[in-house]
Image (cartoon, coloured by chain):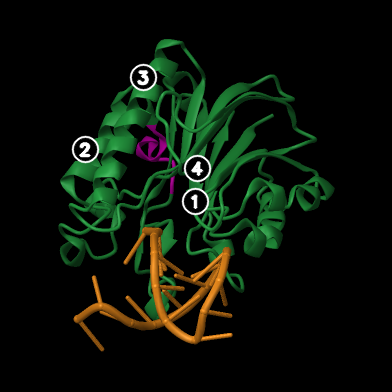
Chain colours: A green, B orange
Amino acid sequence: MPVRIATWNVNSIKVRLEHLIRWMDMAQIDAAVLQETKTVDDLFPRDALADAGLDAVILGQKTYNGVALVTRKSTVKTVENVVFNIPGYPDEQKRMIAADIEHTSGLRLRFAGVYVPNGTELGSSRYLYKLDWMSALAGWVQSEVRADAPLVLAGDFNVAPTDEDVWDPEGWKGRLLVTDPEREAYARIVSAGLVDTWTLGLHAPGTFSWWDYRQAGFEQNHGLRIDHILAAPSISSRISEVSIDTVPRAWEKPSDHAPVVAVIE
DNA sequence: ATGGCGTACACCGTACGA
């Protein structure tokens, strides 16, 4: 039985609750990591998800950031060894969650979700924090890979890895999300021992994962591909499909991001 | 042209996002 996993920056779990439930059913997702839940744990809509057959482990904060791992109760048997934030990297901001999950098929994954800092402005303290945070993440990936973990690292990386991932590469040259230091930091996370599943070539061409709310960004396909799924070789060799589902981006009151899906055989 | 739009918190605007 294939296992369907996803990452989605929902831009507020409260506002996108119905979208999330509808989409996870429609796309038959077994496990999804979410970013920008934007709420404290006490106010996270656990009960509504539970009623929809979904479990969640969460790491939230007020107003900003916040991540979660949502699993389908009927197909994910266990969620264990939950990690909150990057081990050894103290951080006030809530941007990473990981857990060992086991699917009813017997497939085990170490599934990590990340919300990489945006960076705000080139050269700013937040930009340096972004690069530092990514460096810490690469260190954690390396230790997981060394331990032979069946790691899947997915999330909003806030980096468009190549010019093909930018709707207007000339206009975007040198801007936040496409600078060389950001792309190098992303490449170091991958080269810590993972495969960027997009490079498997199993996807349709010309797809982005984020479009600006302003100026009809989605309608004009003025987008970026900044949401990614990376996987350890033992997992990536079993992936049969990688896709960005633009359907929920066209719904009423959408997130500005579309979910990315990978299917593991 | 740093604005355009959306979310949260709280105040009737500000911070932040990408």
Q: Whole-Å distance between the Cαs marked 1 and 3?
A: 25 Å
Residue drawn at x 49%, y 24% is: A151
Between label 1 and label 3, give the one nearer the viewer: 1
Q: Are marks 1 and 3 in contact (CB under 8 Å)?
A: no
Between label 2 and label 4, give the one nearer the viewer: 4
Q: Residue A33: x, y in percent?
A: 57, 42
Residue identifier under label 2: A184
Image quadrant in which the N terminus of chain A is located = top right
Q: Residue A139: x, y in percent?
A: 34, 23
Mark number, residue A94: 4
- Amino acid type, label 3: Gln
Residue identifier under label 3: A142
Q: Is residue A198 magenta?
A: yes
Q: Whole-Å distance between the Cαs marked 3 and 4?
A: 21 Å
| Quadrant position of residue A81 | top right
Same chain check for tags 1 and 3: yes
Residue drawn at x 51%, y 31% is: A239
Residue identifier under label 1: A65
Q: Residue A175: x, y in percent?
A: 20, 59
Residue drawn at x 46%, y 27% is: A236
Between label 2 and label 1, give the one nearer the viewer: 1
Q: Earlier in the sequence, mark 1 or mark 3?
A: 1
